[in-house]
Amino acid sequence: MQGLMLTFLMSLTLLYPALAGEYQAGTLVISDPYTRTTPPMASVGGGFLGITNSADEADRLTGAQVDFADAVEIHEMSMTDGIMKMRKLDQGLEIPAQGRVTLEPGGYHLMFIGLGEALKAGEQHAGTLQFEKAGEVAVVFEVRDITTMQAPPANNAPMHPEAMDTGYMPAQVHDQHPPAETRK
């Protein structure tokens, strides 16, 4: 009986990181991957997580794939002249040696493009992160209810959709916002 109990406890110890939303690939630890609920007609969504690198050399997040979107891009949002701007990181995102990078709303994030359907709270979706050195890491993105999440501070600056680089978005997304000069 003790042997069975010990085996059970050991298996829980090995499973705990995945159950807690933590994944390891070599010297990288990926923690808490999640996305947020989306409205029924949304064609894009965001992905968020933490990446810790315990190696003495940098690695690079170069791409990702998920089971609920046509494409995934790595993006950065930053404040420029009082306006929040978003841009695609064509070269990926460096994970510094002995460092941590957090992908979060209002900063670095994964952009899920071409959502097949609305993301609903409580769902879990498979994904794969691609790293230059660590290779591919399978993760699960938890869908969290956006209405219960607290928004991060944005330096009290307004977000202007017309200032964002949204060239990757389908035409119907662009059509939702008329040009600034036609708005009243």
Image (cartoon, helix red, strand yellow):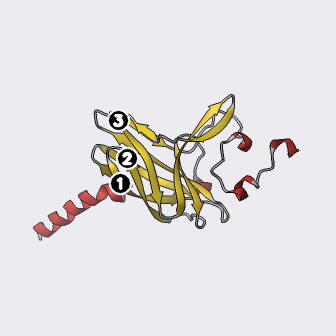
- Residue at 58% across / 56% down in the picture? 113
Nearest to the observer: residue 100 or residue 95: 95
Circle 2 SS class: strand
Distance from Cα at disc 3 to Cα at disc 1? 17 Å
Q: Are marks 3 and 1 in contact (CB under 8 Å)?
A: no
- Disc 2 marks a residue whose amino acid type is Phe
Q: Is residue 184 left or right of residue 36?
A: right
In the orientation shown, which residue stands out farthest toward the bottom?
A: 1
Residue corresponding to mark 3: 58
Mark 2 against mark 1, which lies toward the viewer? Answer: 2
Q: Which residue is mark 1?
A: 137
Name the amino acid, label 1: Val
Local crowd at mark 1 within 10 Å, few (<14), some, or many (≥20)? some
N-term mark: 2 or 1: 2
Label annotation for residue 131? 2
Q: CA distance from mark 3 to mark 2?
A: 11 Å
Quadrant of the rendering where the N terminus is positioned: bottom left
Q: Confirm or deny contact between disc 2 and disc 1 (CB under 8 A).
A: yes
Q: Position of residue 58 (x, y in %)?
A: 35, 35
Residue 63, position as x, y percentages in the image: 45, 49
- Density class for disc 3 (Cα within 10 Å; few <14, some 14-19, many ≥20) is some
Q: Say which quarter of the image contains residue 95.
A: top left
Q: Amino acid at mark 3?
A: Ala
Residue 3 - label = none
| Earlier residue among tags 3 and 1 | 3
Q: Is residue 101 above or below residue 81?
A: below
- Residue at 65% from the left image edge and 62% from the top image edge: 39
Q: Is residue 106 left or right of residue 124?
A: right
Report x, y in % for residue 142.
47, 59
Of residue 92 and residue 147, the one placed in the foreground of this image is: 92
